[in-house]
Image: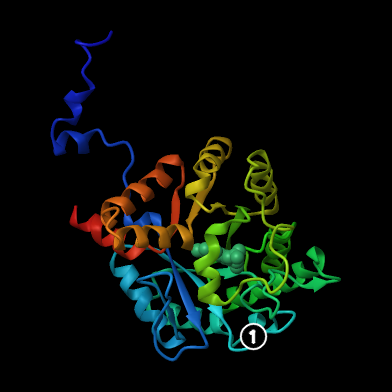
Amino acid sequence: MNFPVNRPRRLRRTETLRKLVQETRLHPADFIYPVFVSELVTKPEPIKSMPGVSNLPVSSVSAAAREAHQLGIQCVLLFGTPSKKDATGSESLKKDGVIQRAVHEIKSAVPDILVATDVCLCEYTDHGHCGIVRNNDVDNDVTLDVLSRQALSHAEAGADIVAPSDMMDGRVGAIREALDANGFEQTAIMSYSAKYCSAFYGPFREAVGSAPKFGDRKTYQMDPPNAREALREIEMDLVEGADIVMVKPALAYLDIIRQARDCFDVTLAAYNVSGEYAMVKQAAASGIAEEKRLTLEILTSIKRAGADIIITYHALDAAKWLQEQ
Ligand code: PBG
């Protein structure tokens, strides 16, 4: 049957009809809101390349979490900048480290919001790599021990979810083992399973000062042309005990999100990263596009591709816009 019997425009006639047949719906509970906590600031310091996002001192994190929670967002993801960096990222393991204190603050002030923590070394190492460097190379197996201890320390501080973003092989299994051996079998792991070596991380690296001082991340993060490899990474993480798997970045990798959705019946997150956010802000500032429509269209595309959870710096704005609709 075809035209004129079939007329797809019939269901596009009014706003109400369009809403009735809408296939993908965004909700504030879809979002995880990333929060930058820094020991280098005493008051919120705007991040230049990410308008609307600031580095916060520990004393400001619970206010940020409360604002997110009041907008219907269920989870924040914490990134930390320590005052001191060294070769092994030892600051990341301290009981009174920046993340550990921030987790404690949020959990005491806003107990109902979930706290996820980024588990990685790049923010804490003086060379900026995501692991321990030996002979000019990031040593995979030596790094697993530090990552496990860091994840455990976040769990001890009260994190609900630990999120390893380093891309070492075997880190999910090592972290699961460390958590279980210490009574944290209920702490969930959200793994950055398919994390690509992307040019879209620029603003983030500026925000936390984590750009590698030599070389790049190509020996551990994934090569952008590869799709099958992403499925293998995800499968390995699931076998090692990941509870939530992630594809990152989101926009240039919507096909990977879709394939992951079709291959695995697990909760899938996608990270709408800093460079994607910055591009929207710049486009809006220069009048190329309307920020609200552009943002909601992008977030909808990530959900339509198959993501259950979207990690996004737009979370607060998007939650407000969704409440208005
Ligand atoms: C590494 C980490 C990165 C991001 C999250 N965790 C940067 C990197 O791999 O260099 C990027 C997030 C973003 O760009 O928004 N710990």
Q: In which quarter of the image is the N terminus?
A: top left
Image quadrant where residue 148 sits: bottom right
When the figure is inspected, residue 295 is found, relative to residue 260, above or below; the finding is: below
Residue furthest to the bottom = 42
From the viewer's perspective, tell me whether residue 282 is left or right of residue 263: left
Q: Is residue 214 left or right of residue 303?
A: right
Residue type (three-letter) at the residue carrying disc 1: Lys
Return the residue nearer the eye: 215 or 164. Answer: 215
Q: Where is ligand 1, by quadrant?
A: bottom right
Q: Position of residue 149 (x, y in %)?
A: 70, 74
Front residue of 10 and 275: 275
Question: What residue is shown at x 70% (from left), y 83% (from top)?
Answer: 90
Q: How crowded is mark 1: few (under 14 residues within 10 Å), some or many (20 or more)?
A: some
Does 94 appear above or below 282? below
Query: Can the viewer see residue 154?
Result: yes
Secondary structure under tag 1 reads: loop
Q: What residue did someone put label 1 on?
A: 94
Name which quarter of the figure residue 235 lies in. Answer: top right
Look at 30% across and 54% down and name the residue there: 288
Query: Percent from the top left, x then y, of residue 122?
Result: 65, 72
Q: Does residue 162 show up? A: no
Q: Along the line of sight, which residue is nearer the eye, 182 or 97? A: 97
Question: Left or right: where does residue 289 sit relative to residue 86?
Answer: left
Residue located 59% across and 56% down the image: 198
Can you name the residue that lies furthest to the right here?
A: 135
Residue 299 image offset from top left, x and y in percent: 37, 50
**Which residue is drawn at the image coordinates 23% and 22% (left, top)?**
8
